[in-house]
Image (spheres, rainbow, N blue to C red):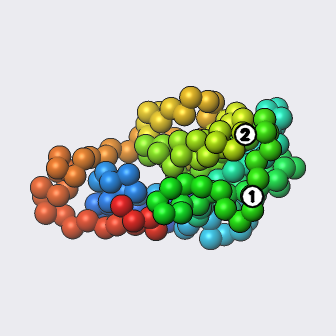
Amino acid sequence: MNEAEVKQLFIDTGAILEGHFLLTSGLHSPFYVEKFQVLQYPEHTARLCAELAKKFNEDNIELVVGPVTGGVLLAHEVGKNLGTRAIFTERENGKMTLRRGFVIKPGERVLIVEDIVTTGGSVDEVIAVVREHGGNPVAVGLLVDRSGGKADFGIPSQALLHLSVTTYKPEECPLCASGISITKRGSRKI
């Protein structure tokens, strides 16, 4: 699956939306990627994750970790393809953490997976959790990098789809200035 095919899959499932959106990062954007429009189809999720796993076949990955919510599905499917365990992080009192008895072994080689990255904040939090627990974060796998290449995790990263999407600070947003009503998508409270 090449990048054009991945993008077409997102378009065909209605995952790429246009309007005025409040992103998890607090920024505003005229575009939003609603990943669950794709991930609601198990066959699409399996296909995308198999492609993502291929990018890390030679990295001796021992564990795949993703943040709740989309990262749970991705970690499971990518881990299945790499023949590893798959766990997830979640927020507790606003802080990303491991729960549910999950353990990262000292020195374990970890691939972090995430669905959509705009600023990379959630991935940075997961990397910190992996390190706190003694793991060795070796790479990041993304369905969509919508940072325009600006997200830098300090370790190698690979994405199936790269999008350069304009974002605005709320006080500088021309969509707000034009009176276009804003839509908040996603599940995390800002």
- Image quarter hosting the C terminus: bottom left
Q: Position of residue 160 (x, y in %)?
A: 61, 44
The answer to whether residue 35 is visible is no
* SS at badge 1: loop
Position of residue 32 in the picture relative to residue 72 (left or right)? left
Q: Nearer the viewer, residue 170 or 135?
A: 135
Picture residue at 17% right of the left edge, 46% below the top: 172
Please tell me the numbered disc located at residue 54.
none
Vertical order, 21 against 41 (above or below) = above
Residue reaching furthest right? 83
The answer to whether residue 157 is visible is yes
What amino acid type should be assigned to the residue bearing mark 2? Gly
Please tell me the numbered disc located at residue 135.
2
Vertical order, 17 against 126 (above or below) = below
Badge 1 is on which residue?
102
Q: Nearer the viewer, residue 149 or 1?
A: 149
Picture residue at 44% right of the left edge, 33% below the top: 150
Q: Position of residue 175 (x, y in %)?
A: 19, 56
